[in-house]
Image (cartoon, rainbow, N blue to C red):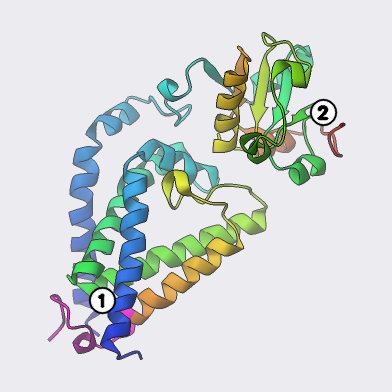
């Protein structure tokens, strides 16, 4: 086994891959270097009208009591711990039509702010559920970027148990 | 050590095909893949961005090399290293109890769980077999003399 040659060949393969990777993504790389994706990797164009909030803002919204928190994780994760008073809307069930999530079904005014969260790290479940909620008629939806992991780690109030029927 | 050329060629096609398919889906939407990488909560957004820009292209080149037969053993080595990395990442994610999509097939990704671990392990066995095989068993363009 000629390891020296193998390493050289592997480096050559990586270099061949780097050329199109850098050239074809030049636009995105420029935007990244300008700091555009420092706060979120989600393109605003892909989620129009949706704001991303951090832990402090999510905490303020919770304290103020005006917003409704929406947990997009699976039911068992919700039962293990969630933001007090949060509605459980597992994305999978929402996509399959197993649960209703319009303003009437949730008994929430469509202009009331919703704070959608999932496990953490801007997970796709929050973004996909947000898109469904927008279609259902909700006007003010915010995604809590840090999600449950950040909320729990910060020592914010926690509620355990299944969602009321 | 596996010497059957037909089996080794089939392994190259399977691993190469999966890598090319996975790479193309990720290349189409680098930011979505960057988000998937960030969701594992191992690296921050900036490293996740660069991983999303570069990794799919390495997967694509490796996959094509395996299929076409250019530097097959080296490509198999790189594929094995990537697969071993994916396996460790998914296992750590499962242990940490984080619920994420694997991000391996763009929008067609499934949850990072046991099924994915087994799939990656099967691919790792195939790519490792190609790497461990004798050069003359492969009959590739890039075979060692």
Q: Would you place residue A71 above or below residue A138 in this image? A: below
The one nearer the camera, B95 or B26, is B26
Asked where in the image residue A69 lies, by quadrant, the reply is: top right
Q: Which residue is mark 2?
A: A84
Can residue B131 be seen here? The reply is: no
The one nearer the camera, A106 or A79, is A106
Asked whether the residues under the numbered discs 1 and 2 touch, taking CB atoms below 8 Å apart as contact, a structural biologist would say: no
Q: Chain of mark 2?
A: A
Q: Position of residue A121 (x, y in %)?
A: 57, 37
Q: Crowding near pointer 2: few (<14 within 10 Å), some, many (20+)?
A: few
Q: Chain of mark 1?
A: B
The one nearer the camera, B101 or A92, is A92
Q: Residue at x 39, y 76 (%)?
A: B126
Quick check: is B141 in the magenta stretch? yes
Q: Position of residue A104 (x, y in %)?
A: 75, 16
Asked where in the image residue A157 lies, by quadrant, the reply is: top right
Asked where in the image residue B16 lies, by quadrant, the reply is: bottom left
Position of the N terminus of chain B, as image quadrant, is bottom left
- Give residue A14's mark: none
Q: Would you place residue B87 above or below residue A38 in this image? A: below
Q: Which residue is mark 1?
A: B73
Q: Residue at x 62, y 15 (%)?
A: A137
Quick check: is A86 in the magenta stretch? no
The one nearer the camera, A104 or B98, is A104
Left or right of B13 on screen, residue A115: right
Secondary structure category for the residue under label 1: helix
Tell me the magenta residue range: B130-145
Residue that sits furthest to the top in the current view: A111
């Amino acid at each position: 086994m000629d390891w020296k040659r193998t390493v050289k060949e592997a480096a050559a393969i990586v270099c061949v891959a780097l050329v199109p990777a850098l050239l074809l993504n030049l636009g995105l790389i420029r935007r990244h270097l300008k700091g555009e994706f420092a706060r979120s990797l989600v393109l605003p164009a892909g989620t129009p009208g949706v704001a991303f909030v951090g832990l402090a803002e999510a905490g303020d919204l919770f304290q103020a009591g005006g917003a409704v928190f929406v947990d997009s994780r699976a039911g068992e994760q919700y039962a293990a711990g969630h933001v007090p008073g949060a509605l459980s809307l597992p994305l999978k069930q929402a996509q399959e039509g197993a649960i209703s999530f319009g303003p009437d079904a949730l008994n929430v005014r469509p202009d009331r702010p919703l704070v959608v969260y999932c496990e953490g790290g801007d997970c796709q479940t929050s973004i996909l559920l947000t898109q469904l909620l927008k279609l259902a008629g909700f006007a003010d939806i915010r995604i809590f970027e840090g999600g449950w992991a950040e909320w729990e780690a910060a020592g914010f109030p926690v509620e355990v148990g299944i969602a009321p029927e | 050590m596996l010497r059957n050329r037909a089996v080794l060629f089939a392994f190259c096609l399977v691993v190469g095909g999966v890598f090319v398919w996975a790479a193309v889906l990720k290349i189409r939407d680098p930011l979505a893949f960057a988000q998937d990488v960030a969701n594992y909560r191992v690296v921050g957004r900036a490293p996740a961005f660069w991983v999303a820009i570069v990794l799919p292209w390495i997967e694509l080149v490796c996959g094509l090399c395996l299929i076409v037969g250019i530097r097959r053993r080296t490509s198999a080595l790189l594929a094995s290293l990537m697969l071993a990395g994916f396996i460790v990442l998914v296992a750590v994610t499962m242990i940490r109890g984080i619920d994420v999509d694997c991000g391996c097939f763009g929008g067609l990704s499934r949850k990072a769980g046991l099924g994915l671990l087994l799939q990656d392990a099967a691919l790792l066995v195939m790519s490792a077999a190609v790497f461990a095989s004798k050069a003359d068993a492969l009959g590739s363009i890039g075979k060692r003399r």
